[in-house]
Amino acid sequence: MPDQPFWIDYEWDRDRASDGKSRYGAYVRGAMQEFQKTWDGTYETNLAGHFAELAWRTATGPVMSPPFADWHAPVMSVDLQVDYEAEGCPLIAVVTLATSQPRALAHGYDGERHWRSWPYERSWTGDYPRDPYGDEFARNCFALASLRLMFAIPAARLPDAPSAARRPGEVEHTARMAAEAVVAELNRAVIPVLTRIERG
């Protein structure tokens, strides 16, 4: 598993590509009607943000499985939202982290009930937190704590969206650059938070 919480799986993308080049590139070509909204006049502002949001959505699940851009625990989810108002900050990232219980429940006991934290499930990228289900409720009570981080990804750190006069392959190349830029910005913001949490 990569050391950083967010990464791009270049090896899987290349080795499992139906065209011998890139799985992600094939998915981008398949979503070209969506990508063209950044140059056909559908969007008038924040074109780099719109393009990066679509590049990220295409690179992650459930669109791609396994995804081109991925993350591991304690990251639970990532959402990108285009900011229509703030100049220079076209994307707002919303990252949800699974965290430990608050100190008031440090031992999982409130005087009446024992509370369990996140159950974890094994996947091919490691263990990940999940909601309890089924007969787990017959045996346990759960106190599931999380932290939601919200921050801007500045336009200056994203590639420009292709224009109508794009070159062959430019959309796929720019989408890859946008996904890489988002991964870099997510790691830049989230790693210091995780470090502080781990230090207690």
Image (tube, helix red, strand yellow):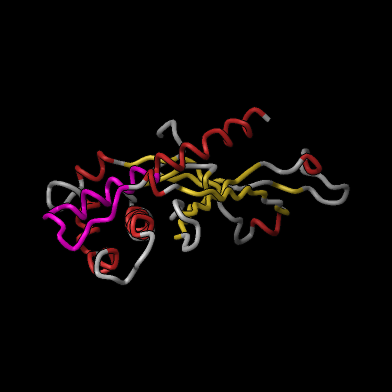
Is residue 22 rendered magenta in the image? no
On screen, residue 11 versus residue 71, left or right, reads left
Residue at the limit of the structure toward the front, as seen here: 87
The quadrant in which the N terminus is found is top left
Question: Which residue shows up at 54% across the image and 42% down it?
Answer: 74
Task: Please say if 2 is above or below 148.
Answer: above
Q: Position of residue 10 (x, y in %)?
A: 27, 40
Residue at the limit of the structure toward the top, as seen here: 199
**Observer-nearest residue: 197 or 175?**
175
Residue at the limit of the structure toward the right, as seen here: 111
Question: Which residue shows up at 81% across the image and 42% down it?
Answer: 104
Q: Which residues are magenta?
A: 159-182
Is residue 166 rendered magenta in the image? yes
Q: Position of residue 98 (x, y in %)?
A: 60, 46
**Observer-nearest residue: 161 or 197?**
161
Can residue 64 be seen here? The reply is no
**Observer-nearest residue: 154 or 115?**
154
Q: How many marks?
A: 0
Q: Position of residue 200 (x, y in %)?
A: 68, 30
Q: Position of residue 73 (x, y in %)?
A: 51, 42
Question: Which residue shows up at 88% across the image and 47% down it?
Answer: 111
Task: Please say if 59 is above or below 3.
Answer: below
Can residue 112 be seen here? The reply is yes
Question: Which residue shows up at 60% across the image and 50% down it?
Answer: 148
